[in-house]
Image (cartoon, helix red, strand yellow):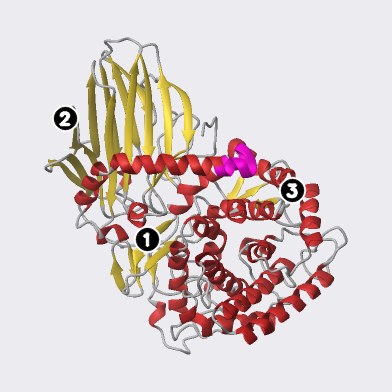
Amino acid sequence: MKVDRVASVPIVLHDPYFSIWSGTDKLYESDTVHWCGKRQRIRGYLTVDGETFCFMGDREFHQVILQTGLEITATGTAYTFENDKIKLRAVFTSPLLLEDPVLVSRPCTYVDFDVVRKAETADVTIDLQLSADLVRYTPGAVVGGAYRTDSFSYAVMGKADQKPLGNSGDNITIDWGYAYLAVQDAYSRVGFDRGGEQLTASVKLGTQYGHGELVVAYDDLLSVNYFGEWKKAYWTETYDTILDAIGASFADKERVQQQCAGQDARLEEQASAIGGQDYALLCCLSYRHSLAAHKLITDKEGNLIFLSKENDSNGCLGTVDITYPSAPLYLLYNTEYVKGMLRPVFTFAACDVWEFDFAPHDVGRYPYATGQVYGLDGEKSGTAYDGSNGCVFPFFYQYPAGSGIYDLRYQMPVEECGNMLILTAAVCKQDGTPDFAAPYFEVLKKWCEYLLAYGADPGEQLCTDDFAGHLAHNVNLSAKAIMGIEAFALLAGWLGQEEMAEEYHRKAVRMAQDWEERGNAGDHMALSFGAGDTWSLKYNMVWDKFFGSGLFREEVFQKEIDYYRKKQNTYGVPLDSRKNYTKSDWILWCAAMAEDREKADALIAPVAAYVKETPSRVPFSDWYDTVSGEYCHFIARSVQGGIFMPMLMHK
């Protein structure tokens, strides 16, 4: 879809390390950056009849060719530039098609140039430069070269001294692996500029040709340590080398780009029908954004493992309360990815070191899935491993029972139990079979019992919105507990445990009735029980509609929606009555609960306005101020998959 301005434009998106954006209105107003803001320079120049123009990256001393258009779809970004002699269209396509895990994992982006000549004899050359910023986080020499295969030419560069998976942390870029730039046609050349420490490509269209194409790729060598196993990315199970992957990208390009075009058109059409152009924009921006905050591998049994990274949050990997808000996108298109997010949590929960009766928060810090790192004992006083300066945490999953490494106060017991139960049931509902849940039934029952014991009126604890601090008697968190219990009742029924299903369903019904009475504050439900002058977004209620459980009365849903509209600021409804900040994913979940299209649109439009008007030029932040439009924290996080909740509910 055509776009005038957004907070940041996706350029090349594949995973938490290979994620390149433009944070300015015009592609030539600044260099491209990694999502965390570190420069990852890609520069593009157009030469027409001997006169050179900059169209991408910091223009420095160059003149520019005027940017006249920007389009963003689910899988691609297209810029249009124009002067009196030619019109240039530059398209970046990262074909992350959820029906094909190989494409989701394959780290190859298509770069296409289409030139229309206004002057018939215009002589055109396009040059692209990829700097060593892409392969280097810490200082060090870069090496590379240019070579050929039977079907394409390529240039490669990487650090001379590499330590794959040599650090761990947040707001850092990769320090290992190799970047590739490849061409196939006879009139294009690629090379490695040792002095300039960059890959170069020159597409000589001359006076005749109108199309040029490149592939930008990245081989990270190793991707994740998964409970002691050094794992490569999923694509390596199909291709022996990155050169095979690049060759396949050229070979299947026509088919893949047709699939991308179809997916882009369907998504925009469906989103527009649900929430108009504002909602379509949010979905187009969120699709690649969410996927690229993950890494796809397999476990030793060959199951998909889809590991998220908490970008600009704390770098945690496989976080349950990050999976929870992101899930609508994956439930909508392919539940295998949700299963891939849940499996690591079940694996860690079975380790001896995890002695709690509730679900864990995470399974490590990217790129190490080696045991929960959130809420370590002594963490707040600075006496534990603080994980700073890129250090790698110990492999906590190996620790024995009784180690006592976790501080109970900084866990999220009701939150994570509810998340695991709800998402497991949601997967089974979408699949039409409880097979995924069957091996985990006993631990799910244990987590359900925890919710029965502590979920009706949660004590002072953290929830997924942990930046807001500890809160006792959290009404929204209690709603999650109720839905978690109902989710277990559904699972029990689907697995043939009819009496158990009825028992837990009755308990969920009673809790919901009690919840409505105790949380009632007149024209809305309170933030916390007993505090009628407070309020909050009750996004957790949406699962009652998803499952069709009927636990909460329709009047409660609509009362909440009407109240949110009263509290709305320029850029959306605040998260609750304590601050002006909000979460974009939760607003869209609330919009999905509105029965009236006009009410849903009223909640969605300010979020779209934020994306278009915010002064914070970072990839779509999910935590921002509803008055100023400034982002608070959190960049390029997978939780924006939650933007798809209205689409999931309509399906």
In whole angstroms, how far apart are the C-alphas of marks 3 and 1?
38 Å
Mark 3 sits on what residue?
A: 596
- Looking at the image, residue 94 sits to the left or right of residue 184; the answer is right
Q: On the image, which quarter does residue 353 sit in?
A: bottom left
- Against 173, residue 169 (above or below) is below
Q: Earlier in the sequence, mark 2 or mark 3?
A: 2
- Residue 442: tell me if it is visible: yes
Residue hosting label 2 = 186
Do the CB atoms of the residues marked 3 and 1 lie less than 8 Å apart?
A: no
Whether the magenta-drawn stretch holds residue 275 is answered as: yes
Q: Nearer the viewer, residue 157 or 82?
A: 82
Query: Percent position (x, y) of residue 582?
Result: 66, 52
Residue drawn at (21%, 46%) of the image:
247
Residue 91, by quadrant, is top left
| Local secondary structure at mark 1 | strand
Amino acid found under the numbered disc labelled 3: Asp
- Separation of marks 2 and 3 at Cα, in angstroms: 57 Å
Q: Position of residue 473 (x, y in %)?
A: 75, 72
Q: Residue furthest right?
A: 522
The mark that comes first in sequence, 3 or 1, is 1
Cα separation between marks 2 and 1: 35 Å
- In the rendered image, which residue does mark 1 sit on? 296
Asked if residue 155 lies left or right of residue 578, the reply is left
Q: Residue at x 40, y 50 (%)?
A: 97
Given contact means CB atoms under 8 Å apart, are the residues at marks 2 and 1 in contact? no
Q: In the image, which disc is placed on residue 1?
A: none
Tell me if residue 271 is in the magenta stretch: yes
Q: Is residue 610 visible?
A: no
Q: Amino acid at mark 1?
A: Leu
Magenta region: 270-280
* SS at circle 2: loop
